[in-house]
Image: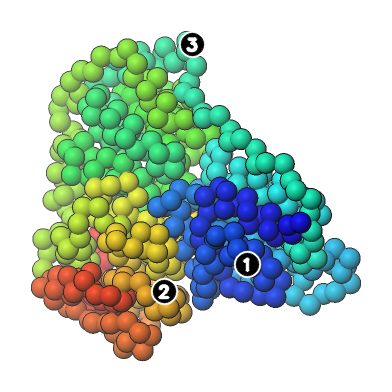
């Protein structure tokens, strides 16, 4: 008869999972063995947070839940950051841990802490797997992780339960029926009348649009009704950003907000398509006037108080957009051309034509990559510049932590994404402080033999925090550090490395890195205070 660990592994494999990431520990060896025998490849990371981001990177290709394996005590404690990230960034994830047996849990204390209580505040659900519960809870974990607004679920499996034989379970439950659009009725009729009357319609799309696969629906709606589109950073590319209707990403840039927020306030019909304000800074609180015509199509209702919409239709975003537009005749919009003017102003302020600096690095990167490339970025000043200036031509073309905004995610995200689709051009972008947090994952890159360029915005300081210190008239404190020789680090860990200080060298080295059969660090040395006036 199968063991509990076997049943969990088989159910995860049946859900489509093919990769698991983590660090071994004695309490999860049986779980890892079961995953391997079920056809799920178990891969070693150098830190549990990085392992979770690798799983997320795979998820953005195959759409199934990420699997993170963490051992007892310190293993799971290390993983809390990436579990919280999955919770706030709406990433489906199944976290597998091992714990001491029930009869030992009140006497044996070495490395023991309550895994369920630790994770509960930052997860959709957390379960301790008891005898006879393995298959049921594995099915439940997948369902909870993926339905509605996705997120992480913990399965904490006592060591004795992992290897205990179990009777054959019932077959996996049938998937839940697909969500439908809003029901016909007065509310939907009113929403359609708003859209039909609108001369200045505007769409704001958020991370739940790509989460639900509603990218094409958003793009089609915008084009049909001639509605310009603002996206959150994680929804960039749902409409190719070289489309005249695309106004780019919003989230953390006050400079961009000066052009985008007036459009939101001026719109006579704002449609929110999977928009989740967890990605937005405080400047996006109540961005439209009281009583404005706002139609909200979220994945689920509630969960925040950042804004209020007069009409709310939670559920399937694509079906909601289709229902909203049914029977509505398109018309000419924005007769004064304000969105085009805002798009032009954003471009004029971009500095993409500068000789050298953060914008020049972004421009060179975009020119070096094919349209369908995937770029990951870390938290920091470079991320804000990149998120505003890097043109995405496909959904999920720019991956990052947006809800939690944690550092250390870009390199492991890129590892997972490249592992899932080796033929895809994938590049990680990171600040020098962020890269120093995850240098161990360069060894993971070496061992996986992944050809991955890592582009470092090297300014020898925590640029965003230093800028905030100065703007707050606070002394410079704990934000500057020495210049690491990243090319030497890369070579020591089995890759290639080079430092660049101009556009021509960066273009040349990006081309070489994309053709190489191993990882490359390109340190773009932009100097301190390089982000002044850019964010």
Q: Secondary structure at mark 3?
A: loop
Question: Around disc 1, counting alpha carbons within 10 Å, would you say few (fewer than 14), some (14 to 19), or many (20 or more)?
Answer: many
On the rendered structure, is 192 left or right of 365? right
Separation of residues labelled 3 and 2 (CA atoms) = 55 Å
Circle nearer the N terminus (2, 1): 1
The tally of labels here is 3
Q: What number is the disc on residue 448? A: 2
The location of residue 282, given as percent across then percent down, is 43, 47
Q: Which is closer to the viewer, label 3 or label 1?
A: 1
Quarter the C terminus occupies:
bottom left
Secondary structure beneath dot 2 equals helix
Question: What residue sits 58% from the left and 33% below the top?
Answer: 176
Q: Kindly check if marks 2 and 1 are in contact, taking CB atoms under 8 A apart as contact.
A: no
- Above or below, comparing residue 345 to residue 429 in the picture: above
Mark 2 burial class by Cα count in 10 Å: few <14, some 14-19, many 20+: some
Query: What residue sits 66% from the left and 75% below the top?
Result: 25
The percent position of residue 284, horizontal first and vertical second, equals 40, 43
Closer to viewer: mark 3 or mark 2: 2
CA separation in Å, label 2 and label 1: 18 Å
- Depth order, front residue of 255/63: 63
Residue 265 visible to the viewer: no
Judge left or right: residue 511 versus residue 472: left
- The quarter of the rendered structure image containing the N terminus is bottom right
Which residue in the protein does label 1 denote? 32
Residue 411 drawn at (x, y percent): 39, 68
Q: Position of residue 386 (x, y in %)?
A: 28, 59
Reading the chain from its start, which is encountered first: label 3 or label 1?
A: 1
Residue where numbered disc 3 is placed: 185
Determine whether the residue tagged by mark 1 lies in a helix, strand or loop.
helix
The answer to whether residue 448 is left or right of residue 328 is right
Q: Is residue 61 visible?
A: yes
Q: CA distance from mark 3 to mark 1?
A: 52 Å
């Amino acid at each position: 008869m199968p063991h509990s660990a076997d049943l969990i592994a088989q159910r995860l494999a049946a859900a489509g999972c093919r990769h698991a990431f983590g660090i071994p520990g004695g309490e999860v060896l049986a779980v890892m063995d079961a995953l391997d025998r079920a056809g799920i490849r178990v891969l070693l990371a150098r830190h549990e947070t990085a392992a979770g981001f690798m799983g997320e990177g795979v998820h953005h290709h195959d759409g199934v839940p990420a699997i993170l394996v963490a051992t007892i005590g310190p293993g799971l404690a290390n993983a809390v950051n990436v579990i919280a990230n999955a919770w706030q960034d709406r990433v489906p994830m199944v976290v597998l841990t091992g714990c001491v047996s029930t009869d030992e849990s009140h006497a044996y204390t070495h490395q023991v802490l309550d895994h369920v209580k630790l994770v509960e505040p930052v997860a959709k659900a957390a379960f301790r797997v008891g005898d006879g519960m393995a298959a049921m809870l594995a099915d439940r974990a997948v369902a909870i992780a993926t339905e509605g607004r996705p997120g992480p679920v913990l399965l904490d499996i006592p060591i004795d339960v992992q290897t205990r034989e179990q009777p054959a379970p019932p077959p996996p439950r049938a998937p839940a029926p697909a969500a439908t659009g809003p029901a016909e009725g007065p509310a939907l009729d009113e929403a359609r009348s708003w859209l039909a009357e609108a001369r200045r319609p505007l769409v704001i799309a958020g991370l739940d649009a790509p989460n639900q696969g509603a990218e094409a629906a958003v793009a089609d709606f915008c084009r049909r009704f001639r509605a310009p589109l603002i996206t959150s950073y994680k929804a960039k590319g749902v409409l190719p950003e070289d489309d005249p209707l695309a106004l780019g990403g919003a989230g953390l840039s006050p400079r961009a907000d000066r052009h985008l927020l007036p459009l939101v306030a001026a719109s006579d019909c704002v449609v929110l398509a999977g928009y989740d304000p967890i990605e937005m800074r405080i400047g996006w609180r109540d961005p439209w006037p009281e009583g404005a015509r706002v139609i909200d199509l979220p994945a689920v209702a509630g969960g925040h108080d950042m804004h209020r919409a007069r009409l709310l239709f939670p559920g399937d975003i694509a079906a909601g957009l289709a229902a909203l537009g049914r029977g509505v005749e398109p018309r000419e919009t924005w007769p004064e051309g304000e969105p085009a003017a805002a798009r032009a102003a954003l471009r004029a302020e971009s500095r993409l034509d500068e000789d050298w600096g953060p914008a020049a690095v972004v421009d060179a990167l975009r020119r070096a990559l094919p349209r369908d490339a995937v770029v990951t970025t870390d938290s920091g000043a470079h991320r804000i510049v990149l998120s505003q200036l890097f043109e995405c031509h496909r959904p999920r073309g720019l991956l990052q932590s947006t809800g939690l905004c944690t550092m250390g995610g870009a390199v492991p995200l890129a590892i997972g994404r490249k592992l899932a689709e080796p033929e895809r051009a994938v590049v990680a972008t990171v600040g020098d402080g962020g890269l120093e947090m995850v240098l161990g994952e360069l060894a993971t890159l070496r061992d996986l033999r992944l050809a991955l360029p890592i582009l470092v915005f090297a300014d020898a300081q925590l640029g965003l925090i230093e800028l905030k210190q100065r703007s707050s008239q606070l002394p410079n404190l704990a934000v500057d550090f020495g210049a690491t020789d990243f090319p030497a680090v890369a070579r020591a860990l089995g890759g290639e490395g080079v430092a660049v200080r101009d556009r021509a060298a960066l273009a040349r080295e990006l081309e070489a890195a994309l053709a190489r059969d191993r990882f490359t660090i390109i340190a773009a040395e932009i100097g301190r205070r390089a982000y002044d006036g850019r964010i």
